[in-house]
Image (cartoon, rainbow, N blue to C red):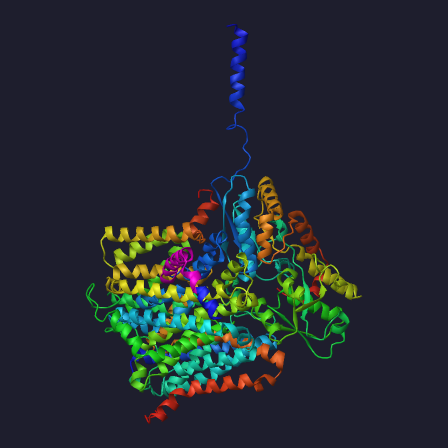
Amino acid sequence: MIDAMISGLMINLQLKPFLFMLIGGAIGFWVGILPGLGGGATLALMIPFVYKMTPQEALPFLLGMHSVVCTTGDITSVLFGIPGEGSTVATIVDGYPMAKKGEAGRALGAVLMSSLIGALFGAFFLAIIIPMVRPLVLAFASPEKFVLILLGLTCIATLSGKGKLGLLMGLLGGGLGFLCSLVGQDRQVGVLRFTFGQLYLWNGLSMIPVMIGFFAIPEVIDLTKRGKAIAGDVSFGKLGKGAREGIRDTFSNFWLTLRCSAIGALMGIIPGLGGAVSQWVSYAHAAQSAKTDEERAQFGKGDVRGVIGPGAANNSKEGATLVPTVAFGIPTSGGMAMLLGAFLILGLVPGPDMLSKHLALTYSMVWTIAIANIICVAVCLLFIDHIAKLTTVRASVITPIIFLFCYIGAYTANNSMGDIVVMMVFGVIGYFMVRSKWPRPPFILGFILGDLAESYLYVSTTCYGSAWLLHPKVIVLLCLTLAFASYPYIYQKLTKKEVPQ
Amino acid sequence: MKKETLLFIFAFIVTITLISPETLPAAPSYQGKTIRIVCGTGPGGGYDRTARLFAKYLPKYLPGKPTIIVENMEGGSSIVAANYLYNIAKPDGLTIGVINRGLPFAQLLKTEGVKFDLTKYGWIGSPTVETNVLTVRSDTPYKSVQDLRNAKGPIKLGSGGPASSATQFPLLLKAFAGIKNIQMVFYRSSREVALAVEQREIDGQTTGYSSFKPQIEKGIYRALIRGRVSEPGIENLPVDESLTNDPIGKKLMALRSGPDRIGRPFIVPPKTPNDLLKIIRDAFAKACKDPEVIATADKLEMRLEYVPGDECLAILKDLFNQPDNIVKEFSKYIKF
Amino acid sequence: MNRLVYTGRIVICMALMAISVTAVLIARKWPFQTALFPVVIGLVIFVLSIPTLILLLMGKGEDEEKQAAVDSQLSTDDDEADGLRKTVIAFGWVFGFFLLILCLGFPAAIIIFILSYARFQGGESWGLSLGLALISWLFVWGLFIRLLHIPFQDGLVQLWLGALGVW
């Protein structure tokens, strides 16, 4: 294994692979920053070049692009409140308020550093578990996946307000999100649910237009009303705390960063769960780490930990989501499906061969994730204080551009006008919810996890009857879920703080 | 010079001018043009890969060597793309479509949202055929059709959804071939089904032969029954139609397997001029025989076999000419 | 509690009750497996919204500083009447952009929207507004249309002109 690791590194350090990795990384930089450029569609463009490359050149090229997307996607989330990728939505909740307070530089520094740590953790994690990855993935069948989804669903309660009313509002939001996730053709019988005669809704509501509408449109409305720059009254170019402060924050919350990286890595390995979940679970965990209720109430208003958590998780999952693709040929996203196609073209068959015969190549992929992110973060940090100044550009210039990004970002999800209608509808709902101080994150969790929960519950009961509840792994995971849900109460009891109500 | 000679030279010059290349009707050429392949599914799947494969290799065989790009137009299991190609796309030979092979059933069952008639498209044909093979994991006790019939417990077969041939094929076997214990389990994608089989959560699935050839050859999976459409390697398997004596069952199985010949349907909008259609058809046929294309397709787990457009059209017309009672029976097992 | 927040929450709660009831009514006609989750979730939402509504109507808001849920905030309106007007105008731009795209297609809509927003909403000069609009158009055309071949549908106007044989 060590030989393969070293061979992998040697592959990446040769001239051509390294150069291709840099080019891929440069492309990935822009793909992440610009909403509307999805990893999948861009990989599709890059694949024709792959025909003429060797695997040693092609893999750093493709992965150099893909692994950097989540790092720079966080930049757009922080600066403009627009989710460029599905996995960078949670960063908006605290990142954008920081930008509005004039702390964009700090937020960016924190998110970039936590992304780097997350990426390195994910790469390291992947490297360690490669020898046992097949048994690990095989161990997580449908009942285990269902309980992990339950874990995600308990975050609905975690992200709700405290007290009876707060909890109820959160649960209601989660329930509505759950219902929205059921729109489309049902998987068991083929009945069209809640599609109201619209072909567009057959595949359900797409995540990106919903997220852009839910988070970005209310902010765009707010920008239009305020008529000021994103950072408010701060005069052009004069931002306060900069990137260095953000980097310091990441290290002063080092254990949180590591824990959230672990959450991202673990959830990313399981095919079917998707990276979208881990960012919210880690956000919930970051919110749990608040020691008092006052502190917790600051989440959503610009607490740097709310940026660090998801920032780390959405990068650590990158390495992890490669696992099902490489070891089993099961792509976990459109981008991974493209990557799978590229593997086949290069003559690499996903499966046991990648973990034995081509182990060095697999490790070179791990190294690519690590090195590409190090370089990307280093480059970003050089310019970050200047990029942050975009938040001081006056509203009349920046707002129409943000409008443009929202609409293009929504449209390119499915190349359909329906996406824009969905974006607007959820824009209205999202705006209303924010103005009424009704929390939105629980809705998102219900939306992402709803139909997943349904699918896995049905498979579990069809295959095992009710016996799956007694599977040892299921019991362990249920205990973990309970532990996760009661973490704040236990923590408070242990530190003898007052438990509210 | 004599008058006649002058007149002759003059007539010669006029004739030459009149029949110069600029005045002859030019053969259609794609020089400098771009062809779009509109793919009814998202990026990364089998249809998309097929579209991109031909986007790469087809220009070689088209006059003028155009650029070909792939556009993904997802929605309604490619009904959106089919509607677009039928009603909006121009029949100028610059738009090709690749659609879900299950669409004939959508039209047959009068699914809502269908705004096309498949028999009116210009049919290029299909570069692959779809085989359906019922496979089980080799450590299950099912070694033959009789074992399946005698099964004591449920035979759990996975599928990506009720509208997939991976569901239709076994359901017809369950209804008519006496394999009563088949139980369908629905997953989110066919790849997840493969994982579930390895995890021993389910016993097997119905799948295309090419995608699982390595596992079948290595003995990890056991192939038991196939559909009418065959390919090298599975010719000796029992065909589903031969496993039932019920004439309606046989008819339904035959109908279901009809569109299997049209593995990846490639079409052009209705009223595309015949000469353009012929050029594209010829290019496809040649590309499917090109060793480089075959090698790349092989890497992508595809086996190329060109099915001409006219054959596809004939299959569809047969499907749509069935009497109502047959269609009604059909709709009990076939969903879209 | 702020009057807007109070009213907003009650409206949302009642909307949720209506949505859940509608969902259950629609779902009850479906086969069992299809209907199970929508009906259960719908019922749960309805049942939970009753005590929520009661708590809201009784004015039992939580102590917002201590117990607030985790979410961003928007700026509050200092003057409610003016705030409402500005909100309506802002949404007008949102729907307006959509209508422009529907009628004229993306490329043309981008130019007109950015030009009008910068000039009329933002108060910028004609020159700057036009410059911004053209640069944005160039960016979208170059990246999304030329390089990525994203299909942007024709607007209704182009379709009508096409039907008339003019486009």
- What range is drawn magenta here? A9-33
Quarter containing the C terminus of chain B:
bottom right
- In depth, the one of B274 and C61 nearer the eye is B274
Q: Does the magenta stretch include residue A29?
A: yes
User: Most extreme residue toward the right, as rendered?
Assistant: B245
> What residue is rendered at 50% in x and 69% in y?
A323
Q: Is residue C3 visible?
A: yes
**Tally of marks:** 0
Q: Position of residue B251 (x, y in %)?
A: 75, 61
- In depth, the one of A38 and B17 nearer the eye is A38
> What residue is rendered at 42% in x and 66% in y?
A367
User: Most extreme residue toward the top, as rendered?
Assistant: B2
Q: Can residue A205 be seen in this view?
A: no
Taking the image as shown, residue C15 lies to the left or right of residue A110, namely right
Taking the image as shown, residue C24 lies to the left or right of residue B252, namely left
- Height in image: B279 above or below A454? above
- In depth, the one of A467 and B273 nearer the eye is A467
Q: Position of residue B115 (x, y in %)?
A: 57, 56
Q: Main secondary structure of the magenta part?
A: helix
- Height in image: A365 above or below C55? above
Taking the image as shown, residue B219 lies to the left or right of residue A491, namely right
- Height in image: B96 above or below A464? above
Q: Position of residue A497 (x, y in %)?
A: 32, 92
Q: Position of residue B241 (x, y in %)?
A: 76, 63
User: Most extreme residue toward the front, as rendered?
Assistant: A3
Q: Does the magenta stretch include residue C64?
A: no
Quarter of the view holding residue A496: bottom left
